[in-house]
Image (cartoon, rainbow, N blue to C red):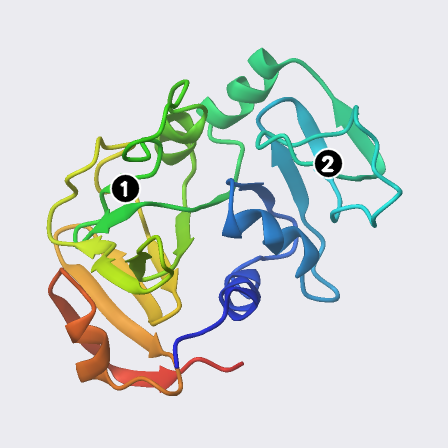
Amino acid sequence: MPLTRDQIVARAARELRDGYTVNLGIGIPTLVANAVPAGVDIVLQSENGMLGVGPFPYEGDEDPDLINAGKQTITALPGASFFSSADSFGMIRGGHVDLTILGAMQVSGRGDIANWMIPGKMVKGMGGAMDLVAGSPRVIVTMEHCARSAEGAKGEPKVVAECTLPLTGKACVDLLITDYGVFSIERGVGMTLLEHAPDLSVDDIRKGTGAAFAVSPSLKPIAI
């Protein structure tokens, strides 16, 4: 069985380092705010103008004035600050966000990402993702390995040789964490499988992947 969404989030949270300023994208990445490891002190940044984002509020404790870029209600940690989106994007474009964790519709074997255009749906634009992948020194993508049909069945691979959807950025993804495994992506080298879902073999992963990848000699199952 592939990993659950919560297990993907838990694995992504292990990439957080003490002192990081981190931006979390819409979807699976937002859940990382609830999975920060004990003893790790990070500052979560939201591109709509906030530093110090806390975990999601409990039901009944929501403040409609506190939202993230995905319009979800959030909490503010002690010392949080609020500012204009212009200042927020100044931080991002200036390289002051240490790590960005995004969702995606497609990731290519060389680290291209397509995550803003949803086929068949009306979208207002790519939002802040283009700036985040260009301005962050490290970009992690968390997503399900394959698309799902309307009935919920596994569909086409989302890890592909070439993205067919409009790109958000080229050769910018450093680490890909899916329900199938963890892949590093190095410029000029390509994808390498570092960790696999405990119940999936390398052959299982290859069958569900549209891009070529190498296998690390130290390949191990994801600790869950």
Residue at 29%, 42% (x, y): give it: 172
For residue 113, which numbered disc appears in the image? Answer: 1
Of the numbered discs 2 and 1, the one sitting upstream in the chain is 2
- Residue bearing the label numbered 2: 73
Q: Please give left or right for residue 72 compared with residue 140 in the image.
A: right
In the rendered image, residue 65, in percent from the top left (x then y), is placed at 79, 23
Relative depth, front residue between 193 and 181 = 181
Q: Could you say whether the residue bearing mark 1 is in a helix, strand or loop?
A: strand
Q: Amino acid at mark 2?
A: Thr
Q: Quadrant of the N terminus?
A: bottom left
Tell me residue 178's x, y (percent). Answer: 38, 64
Q: Secondary structure at mark 2?
A: loop
Q: Amino acid at mark 1?
A: Ile
As drawn, 213 above or below 28: below
- Considering every residue shown, the one lying at the far front of the view is 151
Dot in front, 2 or 1: 2
Rendered residue at 35%/32% (across/down): 116
The quarter of the picture where residue 43 lies is top right
Q: Residue at x 52, y 20 (%)?
A: 89
Instruction: Find residue 179 and report its image quarter.
Output: bottom left
Q: Residues within 10 Å of mark 1 (few under 14, many from 20)?
A: many
Residue at 11% from the left image edge and 65% from the top image edge: 212
* Image position, residue 2 (x, y; %): 39, 76
